[in-house]
Amino acid sequence: MRLKLNGITIYITESYEEMSKKTASIVLAQVTIKPNSILGLATGGTPIGLYKEMVYGYKSNGVDFSQVKTFNLDEYFPIKKDNEQSYAYYMNEKLFNHINISSENIHIPNGENVNTKEECESYNEQIYSCGGIDLQVLGIGNNGHIGFNEPDVSFEARTHLVNLDQETIEANARFFESEEEVPRQAISMGIGNIMHSRKILLIASGKSKANIISKTLFGDISPNVPASILQLHNDVTVVLDQEAAEEILQREELQEYIR
Ligand code: F6R
């Protein structure tokens, strides 16, 4: 199902697999149309299927990533790149080791650089000097965070050092041996960087995201729900599975489109 509301296009798919395929078709089309695209990428559980489909696009359909540049949204701080829980490790495992991207075209905040101020400024500069992000992939936290921009966010912020919310630490503990091992800080692109992307692709899967997706797309635009600022972006595509769409499908505003 496809709905178009206030400049936001929403696709509701049957399953996680279908959501991943749909999202990959958008990313792969971007790379095919503009081979030197600048992609903004996310980590976490949600985009794993997307990355699998992108690898399939490269291996089976010859999609060429040789000129693509990528910027990841965030990285834990402090963390070593070879730590299996680092986002650098995740990206290599899930995507970069399996496609023909050049290592010099990959950008992820460096969680090993103790001079976080310098790291953040240099990350902003690199995004700027590449001409900005063409397509930014986003997941969403249960608290509405995008990147690691937690509630009470500044909508203007660029890449910065973030203190993770307790809710985020608990949600991400599933990837670590214990909650104590989850780093308490991260380097994250700010909402300012995200909003400057030419196109945004937000993906969400599962019941636990249904409420925050409804607040993000239909609630007030508020720093308490960082993702709600996306209502003001002029090119947002949202791809949901059935469970993540559960609450928006109940909304009055949508009934005329659904019937
Ligand atoms: C990760 C990121 C986060 C995640 C969000 C959802 O790079 O930017 O905003 O997208 O925490 O995570 P999952 O997909 O694990 O539910």
Image: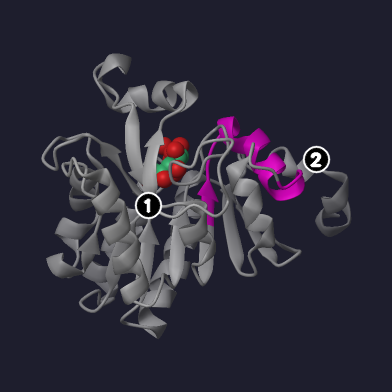
Which residue does the image show at 51% across and 67% down from the upper left?
196
In the image, residue 96 lies at what x, y percent? 20, 59
Residue hosting label 1:
73
Question: Could you say which quadrant of the image residue 44 lies in?
Answer: top left
Tally the numbered discs: 2
Which residue does the image show at 86% across and 55% down from the upper left?
259
**Viewport quadrant of the N terminus:** bottom right
Q: Is residue 224 above or below residue 235?
A: above
Residue hosting label 2:
250
The image quadrant where one finds ligand 1 is top left
Q: Is residue 47 visible?
A: yes
Q: Secondary structure at mark 2?
A: helix
Does 46 lie within the magenta span? Answer: no
Does 206 lie within the magenta span? Answer: yes
- What is the spatial separation of the Cα atoms under label 2 and label 1, in whole angstroms? 32 Å
Q: Is residue 12 above or below residue 222?
A: below
Question: What is the magenta range?
Answer: 202-221
Q: Nearer the viewer, mark 2 or mark 1?
A: 1
Whether label 1 lies within 8 Å of ligand 1 gets the answer: yes
In the image, residue 34 lies at what x, y percent? 38, 83
Q: Is residue 57 visible?
A: no
- Residue sitting at the far left: 82
Question: Could you say which quadrant of the image residue 248 lies in?
Answer: top right
